[in-house]
Amino acid sequence: MLDPELLERITARRAELDELEEQLAKQLAEVRGERDELAIAERVLDRVSEQLAEERASAAPAPGQVGGQAVMLIPYRTPDAEETVLPPDYQRILAAVRQAAGPVMARQVGEVVGVDVSVRALQAGTAT
């Protein structure tokens, strides 16, 4: 013969476990639902990021000429762009400006970059 008290404890424990199982199933469904939502959000974010990158690339300035001379353009600026994407001359200009103790003259920058910075003074009354 089964002990009625023991049978009652088993029944009570089974009820507790059934309730716990129900709670866990509900939590699992919520977790799976949120995970699915995050996966969708990630796909949307990837798609929007690609579209923004395409828009930025199409808005980037195209190489061109000024006064019949080929010009060196600075790459299109993006928030994550690093100085290393700049042409070497631009990097040297930035280095010269950073090393200066105060205001920088165009002559100083020209010397660093290797550009002829000599200026001939015009004399009054001289035709050019």
Image (cartoon, helix red, strand yellow):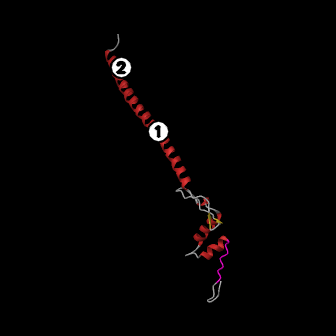
Horizontal arrangement in the rendering, residue 25 relative to residue 72 (left or right): left
What residue sits right under mark 1 in the picture?
40
Name which residue lies at 65% across and 76% down.
Answer: 117
Magenta includes 16? Answer: no
Magenta part mainly helix, strand or loop?
loop
Q: Amino acid at mark 2?
A: Ile
Q: On residue 10, which mark appears?
A: 2
**Closest to the observer, 73 or 7:** 73
Q: Could you tell whether 30 is left or right of 58 in the image?
A: left
User: Residues under labels 1 and 2: Cα distance?
Assistant: 45 Å
Q: Which residues are magenta?
A: 114-120
Which residue appears at 62% of the width and 75% of the height? 108
> Which picture quadrant has residue 100?
bottom right
In front of the other: 111 or 76: 76
Bin the neighbour count of mark 1 within 10 Å (Cα to Cα): few under 14, some 14-19, many 20 and up.
Answer: few
Q: Circle 2 — which element?
A: helix
Q: What amino acid is at disc 1?
A: Ile
**Residue 90: x and y, percent?**
62, 65
How many labels, in total?
2
Query: Depth-wise, is mark 1 or mark 2 nearer the camera?
Result: 1
Give residue 23's quadrant in the image: top left
Q: Position of residue 52 (x, y in %)?
A: 51, 50
